[in-house]
Structure formats: C-alpha cells, structure tokens
Image (cartoon, rainbow, N blue to C red):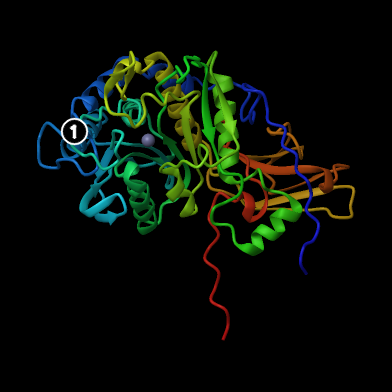
Amino acid sequence: MRVAVVACVCLVLGAAGAAGQDQAPESKPLLRDIASAVSQDELRATITKLVGFGTRHTLSDTQSKTRGIGAARMWVKSRFEEIGRQCHGCLRIETPEQMVQGERIPKPADLMDVLAIQKGTSDPDRIIVISGHLDSRVTDPMNATSDAPGADDDGSGTAAVIEAARVLSKHKFPATLVFAVLSGEEQGLYGGKLLAQYAKDHHWQIEAVLNNDIIGNSKGTSGVVDATHVRVFSEGTKSTETQDEAAKRRYNGGEVDSPSRNLARFISGLADRYLSGFSVRMIYRTDRYSRGGDQVPMLAAGYPAVRLTEGIENYTREHQDVRVENGVQYGDLAEAIDFPYLAQVVRLNALTMAALAMAPAPPAAVKIEGAVSPDTTISWTPVQGAAGYKVWWRDTTAPFWTNSRSAAYATTLTLKDITIDDWFFGVSSVSADGYESPVEFPGPAGSFVPAPAPAAPAK
Ligand SMILES: [Zn+2]
C-alpha cells in the first residue's frame, strides 16, 4: 500500500543555548580536566607552522621539505609521532594513500590522509573520529603554487585534530579515538572518501564523526562578531535510507532524528553543561547551503557525522588570493584567527569525544509499540558496557529531548498513559560511572549502526 498521508512537521528550532540532551546532570571531573587542558598557545603554534608551508594545495609540491602538501603532511605525521611518544606509544599512525584524478585533479595525484589511532581499552571496535582537512586553496581552485595560508580553512580544523590528540592521549578510554587529518577536500572531498573507504576496509564501527572545517574566525564578512556560538550541521534523514525506509519514516516520523542529528543534540548538551558563555547552534542541514565538507562521504558510507563551523564566516578570508583591495585585506591569514574562540570549539570537540568514548554505545535495535493502546512500550537489545538505560521522549515539534525515565537494567520499558501517537521516543545507554550515550530514535531512521546490506532476493 502506498502511503498517502503526509503529516506536516513544523520544526520549532530552539533558541541558541537551549538545553540539549541532559545525559548526566552531574559534572564529570574528567571532562572538566579535558576541557581545561586545551591550549590556545598550542593551537597558535600549529596554525603558524601550517601557514609556514606556503601552500598546502592538494596538487602542490610533494617532494620539498619546506613547502607544499608533502612537507605539511610529513610534519603532521611527525607531530602525531611526538604526541605518541609522550603517551608511551598510545597512538598508531596510519597514512592511507591513493592516486586520484577528477574534475579538479586533471592528472593523477598522490593523495594521503594522516591518521592517529588511540585504541580503546575495553570496547576498541567502537570508533569516534575527529577530522579536519590539511589542504588549502586560493581564488582559483587549480592554482597550486600561490601562497594559500589556509589558516582558518582548514588550518583551524587541523589544529583542532592535533590538539584533541595531544589532550586526549593523556587519558585512556573504553572506545577507540581516531584523529584524522585529511587532504583533497577543496578538489572534491577526496580525503573524506579515502577515510570512508579505509573505515569500510577495516570494518570500523564508527559511532560519530566530528568534522571540523572553518572553526577559528569570529568576525563575519560585514563585521558582525559572534564569539559565543559554534554551528553544528547535521543531516535530518540518513543519506543511506532506502525507499522503503523513507516511506515508513515519512509516515511515522524520524525526519529530524537521524543518528547525526541526535549526535548534534548530544554535543549541544555538553556545551551547555561544560562551557560557559558558549553554545551550539544546531543547524538542521547536512552542511551550509549548497556547500560541502568531508562529513558528506562519511554520511554516504552510513556513518553518523556532523560538521562544526564557526558561528559566522568571513568570505573575504576563505578561498581568496592574499591581497589588499580597496583597503580590505583578503586571504586566509592567521591574523584573523580568534584563538580564544577557536579554543572553545576545540574544547567542545575534545570533551565530546571523551564523553562518547566513556559512554557505552547507544542501544541497538530500538523498537516502539503501542498503536491503539494508551501506553507505549520501547524495547532494545543490550550493549556492551551499559549498566542501565534511559528512555527519552519529547513533543513531536520539540528540538531537544525533554522527558526521561530510567529503565534500570531492563531492555524494555512501558510508559503508562503516554500514547505512541503524540510523542517522539528514544533510548540511551548509561555506564556504571554515569556516562550516557546519545539518544537513539527507534528503527532504521535513528539507528547508529548502519543496517546490514539486504540479503539477495531468493531465486
Ligand atoms: Zn574547508
């Protein structure tokens, strides 16, 4: 039967700073320590070093020791190695590499991502990724020789990845952390595609990708300053949704509850609890209007992913030849980076990775039942490391989860006199020490684990 009724879902977007998922009301000293360990000086030193390579264009020199993408990626690798030595070998460095060619890569070019992997202690198959892109550009995307400082786009994201590695490698986590410095973004998201392929080849169970691209500027093109928000972009429905899943989701809801969206809510809640005067603006989009980033190929591969970007962008800085025109400085120079602001965005990344890695995975196979009944029953399958579960619900027009009830150790809970028709539901997992996972919305629309490929039809 074809579904003919399409409900109007009117989204009420929360004001910036509205409460996110209230995972754990008490403050975690570990997360406070991690946030306070992030250093503006480290971020400044990294961005200064990156700008010093002249250009990091994907098609720039790969042989020079001082200029171009080759020198820059070798430096990132050496920086990860240095951080790894300080944690007594806790980081494994990988450099997936591929020859690529395409519209903006006319001749085959050598593409390399640089990854540092911090293996989890008790649940190492679960993976939390932070990414940023190393490559830079000027006005002409094919110009591989002019100075392209790329301080903000995306020296800021690269600095965030390296600083997260430095801070988080001093601690141990149940889940695995991956620090990913990608390349080829400006030529067509090649580094993100290579990472997605690497993840598939290595059977990574990625629970979250935090893609950081353009996160260090606080003064917009017209001079408006916003140093108190970071935008978190998340897709509403899964890129990998099948037609059948879409039909069911369209009818019963789930258009604002992809795992990426619930990851965004989780991040927003952490900002409210751990950072003062700083909050998330959740943007109900995969990326900025008609623009892209390395989270997109990860979403296409079925992994939950969000993009973090500064609250207000400055277009005289991004993708510009370095020049002064009519008294206006153009070009992506380090002088425009607001380091206190960038440090706040990096704190949010580091504490999000830690909070996710300390918590169990979200519950699996979440189901709800209760049609033509006054009550709603939600059920799920147990996950490793969970000491309890929490059922959440909210009004269908509410942006954040508002109501919750503990299910203790049970894997099913019936909500008496709460009708399935009127609310959206979800469930989270909680560790023995009180770390809570993001909320998972029932069914394929909300599942953090990509559905297995459908079995071949019987002949
Ligand atoms: Zn970028």
Residue 261 vs 108, above or below: the answer is above
Residue 423 lies in quadrant: top right
* Residue ID at (66%, 23%): 15
* Residue ID at (68%, 27%): 14
Mark 1 burial class by Cα count in 10 Å: few <14, some 14-19, many 20+: some
Front-most of 127 and 381? 127
Farthest residue toward the left? Answer: 64
Residue 71 vs 19, above or below: the answer is below
* Residue ID at (9%, 37%): 64
Q: Quadrant of the C terminus?
A: bottom right
**Relative to 362, is 309 on the left or the right?**
left
Q: Is residue 97 visible?
A: no
Front-most of 37 and 134? 134
Residue 47 lies in quadrant: top left
Q: Quadrant of ligand 1?
A: top left
Farthest residue toward the bottom? Answer: 459
**Relative to 237, is 99 on the left or the right?**
left
* Residue ID at (69%, 46%): 410
Front-most of 336 and 271? 336
**Number of labelled discs?**
1
Q: Secondary structure at mark 1?
A: helix
In this figure, which residue is indicated by the disc labeled 1? 75
Place of residue 302 in the rendered image (x, y in percent of width and height, measured from the top left): 50, 53
Farthest residue toward the front? Answer: 326
Front-most of 365 and 79? 79
Instruction: Look at the numbered disc 1 and say if its residue's Cβ is closer than 8 Å to ligand 1.
Output: no
Place of residue 32 in the rendered image (x, y in percent of width and height, measured from the top left): 48, 19
Place of residue 364 in the rendered image (x, y in percent of width and height, measured from the top left): 60, 52
Place of residue 1 in the rendered image (x, y in percent of width and height, measured from the top left): 78, 69
Amino acid type indicated by mark 1? Trp
Residue 433 lies in quadrant: top right
